[in-house]
Image: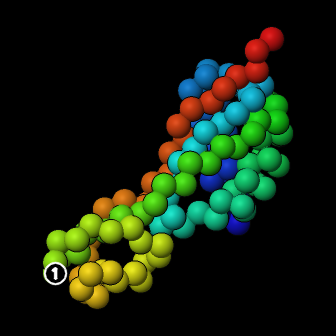
């Protein structure tokens, strides 16, 4: 499962950034709709992996921005839901995907003692 290795990587990034494992309350990530990551599967895998890494049971907060494309035919910038979206103005498929592939670990919140 692809999301299992992503959950493991998130934990590795957090531990490396903090210098050691410690209980967390929240982990904030950004997942673009074209990233190839299934948010529900990642949430499930993260809850399983994080428990084995001594990070407590933090809530995974997912920011899911919209993807945007720029039409090369008419210049319109528009939101897309999938890789096959055409320009809503001219119907062209000749476009450049601008955003939507994001996957970042944005921040963590530690438990206050």
Q: Which residue is mark 1?
A: 73
User: Residue 101's spot in the image, x, y percent?
Assistant: 43, 60
User: Residue 108's spot in the image, x, y percent?
Assistant: 62, 30
In the image, taking residue 25 as reference, residue 15 lies left or right, namely: left
* Of residues 78 and 6, the one drawn nearer to the viewer in this rendering: 78
Q: Quadrant of residue 13?
A: top right
* Of residues 14 and 65, the one drawn nearer to the viewer in this rendering: 65
Furthest residue to the front? 89
Residue 69 versus residue 66 in the image, above or below: below
Q: Quadrant of the N terminus?
A: bottom right
Few, some or many residues within 10 Å of mark 1 (<14, 14–19, 20+): some
User: Residue 84's spot in the image, x, y percent?
Assistant: 41, 83
Furthest residue to the bottom? 91
Q: Quadrant of residue 22?
A: top right
Residue 84 versus residue 100 in the image, above or below: below
Residue 9 versus residue 44 in the image, above or below: above
Residue 12: tell me if it is visible. Answer: no
Q: Indicate the secondary structure of the residue bearing disc 1.
A: loop
Q: Quadrant of residue 76?
A: bottom left
Which residue: 59% across, 63% down?
Answer: 37
């Amino acid at each position: 499962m692809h999301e299992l290795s992503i959950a493991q990587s998130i934990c590795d990034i957090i531990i490396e950034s903090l210098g050691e494992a410690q209980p967390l309350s929240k982990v904030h990530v950004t997942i673009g709709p074209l990233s190839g990551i299934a948010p529900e599967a990642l949430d499930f895998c993260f809850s399983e992996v994080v428990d084995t890494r001594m990070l407590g049971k933090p809530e995974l907060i997912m920011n899911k921005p919209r993807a945007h494309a720029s039409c090369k035919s008419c210049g319109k910038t528009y939101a897309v839901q999938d890789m096959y979206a055409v320009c809503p103005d001219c119907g062209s498929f000749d476009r450049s995907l601008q955003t939507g592939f994001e996957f970042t670990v944005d921040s963590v919140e530690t438990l206050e003692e």
